C-alpha cells in the first residue's frame, strides 16, 4: 500500500497497474478495509489533499497553488485539487474509489462536475449533500473571534467530538489520537487551524453540490423512478429452498456455460420457455438473487468486499453493479418482470424501458451524459421538472446508453413474462434484438436472459437461442416442494400411514406434469384435508381424481364452492377481471358488498335480506372469505404505496393467483362452473354484451374497464 505523498503524486500512470486499482481516502479510519482488499486489488491508500499526513500539494495540473489552510475547509478547492490529481495520473481505465465521510462529497463532485470516471464508487459513513458538518460549525463560523479565545484543552474536547462523529463505529483510541494530532499539536496554532476549518466548512459549498445533484441527475432519476415497475419482483413467490439449483449445473442445462461465455456476439440471448404456471417467474427471481450468478460470470460485488460499515450505500436488489475479475468493465444487472394483472406500467414496453434505464443510471452515473439531453428536452417541452416519459424517448435513452463509446459497460438483462406484455410482441422482440446490435462488444456488451411461454412469435425470434423448457426439469423440485409441505402437516401420522403419504407425494409429483401452479392448488387442498382430519386413503383418491389440465382444475375448484357463496364468488371474480389495476382490499370488499346488496335487492326486495349483511363483518376476515368464495383463485398481495402518498406502509390489493386464472375467467365469463351462480330471473341478461349486466347497474368507478359498464361501486377509488 502506498500513502498519498509528493512521491506518490509523481509516479507514472503505467506504474499504477490500473486494471485493478482501488483508491481509498481517509487513510486512518478505514485502513483495515484497505488491508483486506489488498489480497485482491492494488490499493492506493492516501489522505485527501490537505488532510492528515498528506502535505499541501504543490503546483498541480489545472489547479491553483492553494495554501493548505485553504484546502482544509473548502470542498470546492479540494475537488479541484483531486480532479487535477486524477487527470495527472491519466489512468488507462477508471479506478475504483472508496470514500469516507465528507470525501464522499468531494468524490461526487469529481464524478458529476469534473467528469472524472470511476469503475465504481463506494461511500462509507458518507456526507453526500448539505447541510454539511455539525450544527456547532455554524456557531463557530458566526462567533469566530470568541472561539479563538477558548483555552486549548476545551478545543481538544471539540476536536475529539468532531472526529468521533465522523464514523458509525467507535475508533480505536490510537487511531483517534492520530486523527486529532494535526489539530492538537502546536498549542494555539493547531487549535486555530481547527477553528479555521470549521469556519470554512459552511453550507455554501455543499449547497452548490445539492443544487447540482437535485436539479440534474436526481431530478432525472425521480422522473424515471416508478415503484410499480419494481413491485412485481417482490410479489413473485420465492423459490422453495430445495428447488431450481439445477439451473447452475452445467451437466443439466447450458445456463452456466452461457454465462461464462465471453464471446458475447455468439450467443447474446438465453431463452427460458415453459408451460403456463410452470414456475418461470419464480425461476427468474431465483436466478437474479442467487450468488452463483455472480460467480459464474466471474464477478465480484461490492458486497463481497465485506464492507462492515453500516453507512455503506446499498445497491438495488434488481440492479446490481458488478465488477469482472478479468477486466475493469462495469457490469449492471437490470431486471423487469412483465405483469398483466398489474398496473399499466407493469405490463407495457414503456414500463420496462423506464425501469431498465433507471436501474442502469443508478449503478453507472457516468452514463447520465447519454440521457440528460433527452431528459432536458423532455422537461422543457412539458415545462415540468418531472416530465412524463413515453416509449419513444425511453427507447432513445436506452439506445444512447448502448451506443455510447466512452464508458466500458456490460449489461445483463433479465426480462420475465414476455407473454404478459400488453403491446405488440413483434415490436418488443425487435427492440431487444436492436439493443444487442447497437452494442459493439468492446465498449458495450449485452447479454439477455428472457422468459416466456412458447408462443409462435417468441419461437420465431428466440427459438435458435440457447435455453430450455422449464417443465422438463422441475420434477425433483415439485417432489421436494410437495414433500416439505405435506410432511409438515402430517407429523402426527402413525408409522403405518407413512407409506400412504409417500404414495400421495409421488402421485402429485407425477400428475403435475411440471406445472407448479397446479401443484400449489392441489397441495393447498390436501393440506386442508389434513387439518380437517380426512383419511389419507380419501386424500389419495381426491388427488388421483383431480383433473390435470389447468382450466379443468379451475372449473373443478369453482364447482366445489358452496351454493350459498356462488353469487359472491361470481361478483368477486368479475370485479377482479374488470379492474384495470388490482383493487385495494377495502375497496374491493366494499364493492363486492355493494353489488351483492344491489343484486339481492333486485331479486329479493324484502328488507330483511339486506339486513343480514354488515360491511364490518364482511371485511373482518378477507383472506378466509376470498378462500371460501373463490377456492383460493384470488389472493391478497402487498404493494408499495404510490410515490408521494401520505401512507408509507404497503397496501393490500386483490388479484388472481396466476395469469392463467385471469385468462380462464375472461374466456368463460358466464359459464365458470359455479352452481346456480344467479337465479333464473337474472340469467336473461346473459345475452347482453357486458358480463355483469345481470346486476343492472351503472359504472361509478374509474378504475374498471369501461367496456364493463354495469358494475356498481359506492365510491371512486381511482
Image (cartoon, helix red, strand yellow):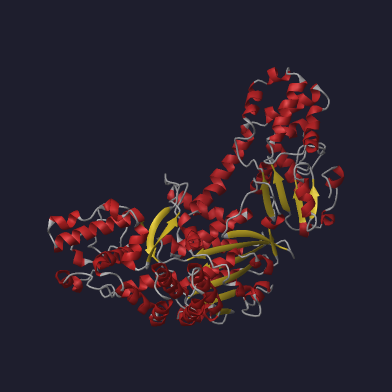
Q: Residue furthest right?
A: 7
Choose between 592 and 453: the one closer to the eye: 592
Task: Please state if 659 lies on the left or on the right of 437 as rendered.
Answer: left
Q: Residue 100, located in which quarter of the rendered image?
A: top right
- Residue at coordinates 29% horizontally, 51% vertically from top-left? 616
Residue 179 visible? yes
Q: Is residue 676 above or below residue 598?
A: below
Q: Is residue 484 above or below residue 213?
A: below
Q: Residue 473, located in which quarter of the rendered image?
A: bottom right
Choose between 544 and 404: the one closer to the eye: 544
- Residue at coordinates 63% horizontally, 73% vertically from top-left? 248
* Residue 189 placement (x, y as % from top left): 80, 24
Residue 582 visible? no
- Residue at coordinates 30% horizontally, 60% vertically from top-left? 704
* Residue 476 placement (x, y as % from top left): 56, 78
**How many numbered circles does the render carry?**
0
Q: Is residue 110 above or below residue 583?
A: above
Amino acid at each position: 500500500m502506498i500513502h498519498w505523498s509528493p512521491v506518490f503524486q509523481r509516479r507514472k500512470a503505467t506504474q499504477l497497474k490500473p486494471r485493478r486499482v482501488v483508491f481509498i481516502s481517509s487513510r486512518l479510519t478505514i485502513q483495515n478495509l484497505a488491508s483486506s482488499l489488498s489480497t485482491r486489488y492494488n490499493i492506493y491508500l492516501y489522505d485527501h489533499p490537505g488532510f492528515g499526513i498528506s502535505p499541501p500539494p504543490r503546483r498541480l495540473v489545472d489547479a491553483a497553488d492553494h495554501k493548505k489552510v485553504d484546502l482544509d475547509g473548502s470542498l470546492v478547492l479540494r475537488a479541484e485539487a483531486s480532479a487535477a490529481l486524477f487527470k495527472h495520473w491519466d489512468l488507462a481505465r477508471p479506478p475504483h474509489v472508496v470514500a469516507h465521510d465528507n470525501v464522499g462529497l468531494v468524490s461526487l463532485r469529481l464524478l458529476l462536475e469534473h467528469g472524472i470516471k470511476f469503475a465504481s464508487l463506494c461511500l462509507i459513513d458518507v456526507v453526500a449533500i448539505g447541510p454539511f458538518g455539525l450544527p456547532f460549525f455554524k456557531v463557530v463560523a458566526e462567533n469566530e473571534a470568541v472561539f479563538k479565545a477558548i483555552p486549548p484543552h476545551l478545543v481538544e474536547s471539540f476536536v475529539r467530538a468532531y472526529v468521533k462523529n465522523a464514523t458509525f463505529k467507535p475508533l480505536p483510541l490510537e487511531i483517534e489520537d492520530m486523527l486529532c494530532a494535526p489539530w492538537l499539536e502546536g498549542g494555539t496554532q493547531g487549535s486555530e487551524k481547527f477553528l479555521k476549518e470549521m469556519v470554512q466548512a459552511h453550507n455554501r459549498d455543499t449547497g452548490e453540490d445539492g443544487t447540482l445533484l437535485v436539479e440534474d441527475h436526481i431530478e432525472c432519476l425521480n422522473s424515471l423512478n416508478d415503484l410499480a415497475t419494481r413491485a412485481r419482483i417482490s410479489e413473485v413467490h420465492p423459490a422453495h429452498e430445495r428447488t431450481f439449483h439445477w439451473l447452475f449445473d452445467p451437466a443439466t442445462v447450458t445456463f452456466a456455460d452461457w454465462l461464462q461465455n465471453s464471446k458475447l456476439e455468439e450467443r447474446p440471448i438465453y431463452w427460458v420457455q415453459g408451460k403456463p404456471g410452470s414456475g418461470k417467474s419464480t425461476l427468474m427471481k431465483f436466478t437474479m438473487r442467487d450468488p452463483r450468478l455472480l460467480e459464474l460470470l466471474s464477478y465480484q460485488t461490492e458486497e463481497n468486499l465485506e464492507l462492515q460499515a453500516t453507512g455503506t450505500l446499498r445497491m438495488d436488489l434488481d440492479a446490481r453493479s458488478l465488477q469482472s475479475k478479468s477486466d475493469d468493465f462495469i457490469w449492471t444487472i437490470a431486471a423487469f418482470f412483465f405483469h398483466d394483472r398489474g398496473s399499466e406500467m407493469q405490463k407495457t414496453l414503456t414500463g420496462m424501458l423506464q425501469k431498465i434505464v433507471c436501474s442502469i443510471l443508478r449503478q453507472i452515473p457516468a452514463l447520465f451524459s447519454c440521457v440528460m439531453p433527452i431528459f432536458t428536452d423532455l422537461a422543457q417541452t412539458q415545462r415540468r421538472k418531472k416530465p412524463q416519459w413515453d416509449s419513444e424517448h425511453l427507447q432513445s435513452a436506452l439506445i444512447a446508453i448502448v451506443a455510447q463509446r466512452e464508458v466500458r459497460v456490460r449489461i445483463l438483462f433479465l426480462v420475465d413474462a414476455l407473454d404478459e406484455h400488453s403491446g405488440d410482441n413483434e415490436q418488443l422482440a425487435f427492440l431487444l434484438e436492436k439493443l444487442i446490435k447497437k452494442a459493439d462488444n468492446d465498449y458495450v456488451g449485452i447479454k439477455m436472459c428472457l422468459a416466456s411461454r412458447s408462443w409462435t412469435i417468441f419461437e420465431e425470434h428466440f427459438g435458435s437461442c440457447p435455453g430450455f423448457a422449464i417443465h422438463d426439469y422441475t420434477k425433483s423440485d415439485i417432489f421436494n416442494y410437495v414433500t416439505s409441505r405435506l410432511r409438515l402437516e402430517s407429523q402426527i401420522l402413525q408409522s403405518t400411514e407413512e407409506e400412504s403419504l409417500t404414495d400421495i407425494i409421488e402421485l402429485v409429483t407425477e400428475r403435475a406434469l411440471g406445472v407448479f401452479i397446479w401443484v400449489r392448488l392441489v397441495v393447498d387442498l390436501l393440506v386442508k384435508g389434513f387439518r380437517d382430519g380426512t383419511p389419507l386413503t380419501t386424500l389419495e383418491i381426491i388427488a388421483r381424481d383431480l383433473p390435470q389440465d389447468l382450466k379443468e382444475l379451475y372449473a373443478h375448484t369453482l364447482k366445489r364452492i358452496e351454493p350459498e357463496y356462488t353469487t359472491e364468488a361470481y361478483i368477486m371474480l368479475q370485479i377482479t377481471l374488470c379492474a384495470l389495476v388490482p383493487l385495494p382490499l377495502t375497496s374491493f370488499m366494499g364493492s363486492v358488498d355493494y353489488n351483492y346488496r344491489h343484486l339481492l335487492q333486485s331479486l329479493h326486495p324484502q328488507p330483511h335480506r339486506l339486513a343480514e349483511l354488515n360491511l364490518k363483518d364482511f371485511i373482518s376476515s378477507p383472506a378466509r372469505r376470498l378462500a371460501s368464495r373463490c377456492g383460493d383463485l384470488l389472493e391478497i398481495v402487498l404493494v408499495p404505496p404510490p410515490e408521494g402518498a401520505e401512507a408509507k406502509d404497503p397496501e393490500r390489493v386483490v388479484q388472481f393467483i396466476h395469469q392463467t386464472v385471469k385468462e380462464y375467467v375472461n374466456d368463460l365469463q358466464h359459464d365458470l362452473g359455479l352452481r346456480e351462480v344467479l337465479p333464473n330471473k337474472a340469467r336473461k341478461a346473459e345475452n347482453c354484451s357486458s358480463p355483469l349486466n345481470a346486476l343492472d347497474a351503472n359504472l361509478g368507478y374509474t378504475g374498471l374497464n369501461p367496456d364493463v359498464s354495469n358494475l356498481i361501486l359506492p365510491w371512486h377509488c381511482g
